[in-house]
Amino acid sequence: KMRRDNKDFSEIYDLTGIRILVHGVDQCYAALGIVHGVWPPVEGRFKDYVSKPKANDYRSLHTTVLGPEGRMLEIQIRTHQMHRVCEEGVAAHWRYKERGRSSRRLGDDAAWISQISGILQDTNDQEEWSTTLKTDLFSDETFCYTPKGDIIRLPAGSCPIDFAYYIHTDLGDHCQGAVVNGRYAPLSHELKTGDVVQIETSKTAHPSPDWLNIVGSSRARSKIRAHLLEANRENLTEQGRVLLSRELHRLGKNPNAFFGSEEFQEILDSLAVKTEEDLFALIGFGRIATKQVIARILKNRAKGKKGAAPKAIGETIRISDIDDMLYRLARCCQPVPGEGIVGFVTRGRGVTIHRWDCSNIRKFQGDQARLIPMRWDQNGEMGSLVEIVVEANDRHQLLADISNTISSAGIDIKGCHTLSFDNNRATLSFSIVIRDILQLERLAAQLIDVQGVLTVSQRRGNRTRPLA
């Protein structure tokens, strides 16, 4: 708790606690009075979750007192029914209450389940769903009132827009202003517990994209996105079509033919999207990325769909399988045939091939949709240009001996650069074409035997990797 809330040990008040269970709500408050009569309460440490339950229906009285020997003591007071909900959950309590009855409908004490279920239906984004649970169920809350005195429970940090959408979607969609405690307040005004809020509407008022930056509840955010998507659907659909068509052209596919294919329908199903227009609109709105579609196309190629013979072993793709699209070897790690590799789907530059242990690839482990397990072709036709660095004691004929060793191994030299230093040391860099990593390692073993050679390494971007 100290780490989670960044608190000092002296700020932890619930090291010692007592829980009191009673039979009725009236007895909760009676017990509270007795406790405060025995031990003095700590100011600001009383919370009444009985009259104002949490969103997940948690109910209890919490108070911290100065107990025996002046030690902080937290006391929780609740009924047996409240304790059952706390320990077993609202669903278990609901089953208990419905025992022996035919009705299986959720009661008011589980209304929050229906609320969260409704938000889930509005999004397929797992990250957004997780955020919803954290913000709407487990965050601090604000209790506001309608002009008629009805209590509206909102996540802390909510504004009048959240208030409006909690009451009704149409009220939120046409919200143009708010009166808080009898005074006009901007829509960005942060509501506090006890505020009385009245929403003013207009038929010409509609949600703005800026609202997404000021609302505090996932319910409001979901409704705003849905309205913006529908209001700009035609433009977003065209934008999404253009973006996806551009990526398909890079893959060597005809967009019009692909959009009518069975493979495209399978991709729609995997994304839980009904029609191609829906997909284009979601891409244009930014709710689905083109990379998600491209990644599925590449996986389908790897699995050899449509009756084609499998091109890959397991889930890997050969480099020759992507010859019809743009790809390149990463400069940061400069992979060599024979090393473990992975493809990374870039934005606008095709596929970049990295070593599997490249530090840049580790940064994208959480974005698996853009990573493609790959392997090198086994035909040996593809050569790889690498740079090796030889550190040696300088002497007569050193360059000739090293060059002869490389040529004798059947390796072409494309370039050479040498530096001599006052301490009788020399650094020789060679750009060579090798067949695979094994040939490179064998060459390093031969070079280290050359008189005067101290180390042999491979330069990868700004770093070097020792070979011998």
Image (spheres, rainbow, N blue to C red):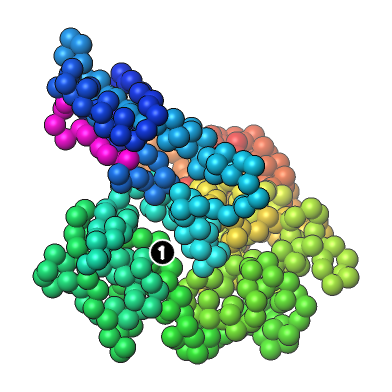
On the picture, is 28 further left or further right than 66? right
Question: For the N terminus, which image quadrant?
Answer: top left
Percent position of residue 74, x then y: 27, 24
Looking at the magenta stretch, what is its main secondary structure? Answer: loop
The foreground one among 94 and 189 is 94
Which kind of residue does numbered mark 1 sit on? Arg
Q: State the residue lying farthest toward the top.
A: 69
- Range drawn in magenta: 41-50
Q: Is residue 434 visible?
A: no
The foreground one among 249 and 13 is 13
The local secondary structure at tag 1 comes to: helix
Report the residue at 29% width, 78% height from top: 175
Q: Is residue 36 above or below residue 218?
A: above
The foreground one among 127 and 403 is 127
Residue 302 colored magenta?
Answer: no
**Mark 1 sits on what residue?**
219
Residue 45, picture quadrant: top left
Report the residue at 50% width, 43% height from top: 90
Percent position of residue 97, x then y: 55, 41
On the picture, is 308 further left or further right than 53? right
